[in-house]
Structures are given as structure tokens and as C-alpha cells.
Amino acid sequence: MPYEKGNGKTVVIALGGNALGNTPQEQLELVRNTAKHIVDMIEDGTNVVVSHGNGPQVGMINNAFAYAAANDDKTPDMPFPEAGAMSQGYIGYQLSQAILNELKRRDIMRSTACIVTETVVDEDDPAFQNPTKPVGAFMDEETAKAKAAEMGITVKEDAGRGWREVVASPIPKRIVEFDAVRDLVEDGYVVVSTGGGGVPVFETGDGYVGTPAVIDKDRSSALMAAELGADMLVILTAVEKVCVNFNTPEQQTIDEMDVAQAEEYIKQGQFAPGSMLPKVEACIEYVEAYPEGRALITSLECAAAGLRGETGTVITAN
């Protein structure tokens, strides 16, 4: 029997993979806290679809299998797309379970569903010629370059924090399981989907084929939100509001901006690549594809208040 939907907005919430901890045990504790904030929104009547990043987790899985395969002939090497699906499964399991437990604690008659999703990308996407998406653990330069030589991977320095493996980050074109997500949302489920941006696949004459890459989860979330006709895309980050002149005496927070203003700030170099820039770009993609919607960038702790219009940075089409 379908669950009763909330009577408020439908929103797609994008959680960062780096905010989920470094181990499954640490992640389990963090998602319990995350679930409380998500259920705050559901309690306000909001219908929620949750997506999440997976950069650290897919890298951890990939590295573990690569090490095991190199040191134990009984362990096969694991293709990167399958590692991506594994990360979706275990992060989605913990998120959906934590949300379900919190719903039960509050006597809210809703249930969760976790969907492992594939996302179609273009074989000719230039991202495949220039890998940029960091995955896995941080390493010092010597260790990273040694691993690159040994395993044939690409490594780069990541924002002054150390060296990491990088893979391609192609543009998402279509979410394969979109119809299933839409039907579950319409039946009142709290859906966890499009984890890590979805497993990247090529669409060929013989069907779908996985490819080693990690899609930016904010861009896939923007695509999901636009296709759903969601009232709002909520991208969670470490700060309550987007700033210009960040970390300078002239720093200012932004309450609201339209696409033209956001693009002007991008031209000025106000938003750091690999940090705030892709989040703002994803918001622009969403409101351009679905002008009726509004995008919100804020912190997890402020998300429920942001949906009520009390805080955060809102981005609109015009």
C-alpha cells in the first residue's frame, strides 16, 4: 500500500561523500546525525530524495581490491564501475536504514527505498582525456607516484591536502532508473538514489556498459531534480551560505542570486574549483532546466531552516 506523501515541497538533497567519514563504522555514526536533519524536513511535510557523493568510499573499495588481488591470487581484481555500485549499496544501506530508524522513532508512517542507479555518459566526453575527480585516500607525493607507476593510474595533488588518484568526471546525460525513482517518490517513499552520481555507463547497440569514472554527484542531483520537477535542489556543504571574497576582509555572504549574477561571480573567480564552483554550476544547470525550481546551498544543520526560507543561499533562474 502506498505511503502518504508529505503535503509540502519535493526536494532532492545532495550529501557530500567526504562528509561521511573514513570508515564504515565512522560513517554509520555520521549518517545517524544526518538522518535526524533529513527527518526534520520530512516532519515539516517535505518529500525527500537523497543523493550522496562516494569519492572516498569508491576509492577505498577500489584500493582494497587492487591490493588484495596483487597479494592473493584467490582475490580477483574489481572493475571500477562495480566498485562504484558497491559504494552506492553500502552508503545507501546505511543512509536508508538511519532515516527509517529516525522515522520510526518519531512515529512517522513513511518508509525508505535505496536504488542503485546507472547514469548514461557520452563516450566522446573530453573528461576522459583529462581525469580530474579525486577518489580514495590521501597520500604523500612519493607514495602516490609510486602507486601510479605500479597500477597505471593517474594521481594529482588535491587542494593542498595531499595526493589522490583521479578519474574522469564526465557530464551526466540520463539516469537509467529514473522511472523507478519517480514512481517510488509518487508512492510516498523517501528515496536514496544516484549515489556517487550513479555508475557511469555508455549506451551502446548492445545495451549499457560500465566505464571507469566518477560523475559529480551535484550535477547528477541537478539532473534528477530537473527531471522530477522537484521544487528545490538542496546542495549541502560545510558553510551556511555561499560567500564572495571568501577568507578576505571583504568577505560577504549571499542570500540569493539569479543565474546572471552567479555567472558573473564565476567569471570573477569567486568560487573555488573543486569546492564551491561545481555546486554553484550544478544549481545553475538545475534552474535553467527547470526554471520553476529554486536551488539552495547550505549546511546540513541549516537545511530544514533553509527550506523554510530562513537561511542559506538561494539560486533562481531570474
Image (spheres, helix red, strand yellow):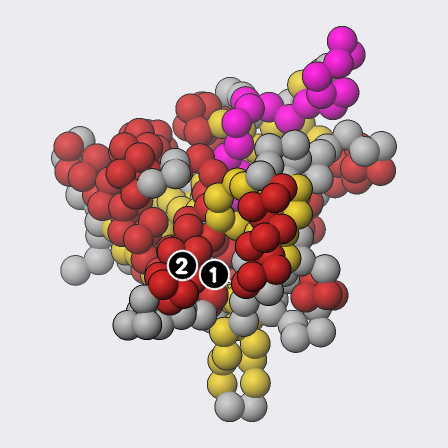
Q: Dot 2: what SS?
A: helix
Q: Mark 1: give few (<14), some (14-19) or many (20+) Cα within 10 Å.
A: many
As drawn, the label of residue 128 is none
Q: Is residue 192 visible?
A: yes
Where 288 sits versus 243, above or below? below
Q: Is 190 on the left-hand or right-hand side of 164?
A: left
Residue with the mark numbered 1: 198
Identify the residue at image location x=28%, y=72%: 74
- Name the spot of residue 286 as percent of width and height, x first: 62, 50
Identify the residue at image location x=85%, y=32%: 268
Identify the residue at image location x=28%, y=55%: 113
Residue with the mark numbered 2: 67
- Name the spot of residue 264 as percent of width and height, x first: 83, 35
Amino acid found under the numbered disc labelled 2: Tyr
Task: Report the number of numbered marks.
Answer: 2
Q: Residue furthest bottom?
A: 206
Q: Dot 1: what SS?
A: loop
The residue closer to the viewer here, 35 or 287, is 35
User: If the image is split into quadrants, where does the C terminus sit?
Assistant: top right
Amino acid found under the numbered disc labelled 1: Gly
Q: Earlier in the sequence, mark 2 or mark 1?
A: 2
Magenta-colored stretch includes residue 233: yes
- Name the spot of residue 260 as percent of width and height, x first: 80, 39
Q: Is 145 on the left-hand or right-hand side of 45?
A: right
The residue closer to the viewer here, 126 or 276, is 126
Q: Is residue 216 visible?
A: no
Magenta-colored stretch includes residue 200: no
Give the magenta range. 232-250
Q: Quadrant of residue 183?
A: bottom left
Q: CA–CA distance between discs 2 and 1?
A: 25 Å
Q: Mark 2: give few (<14), some (14-19) or many (20+) Cα within 10 Å.
A: few
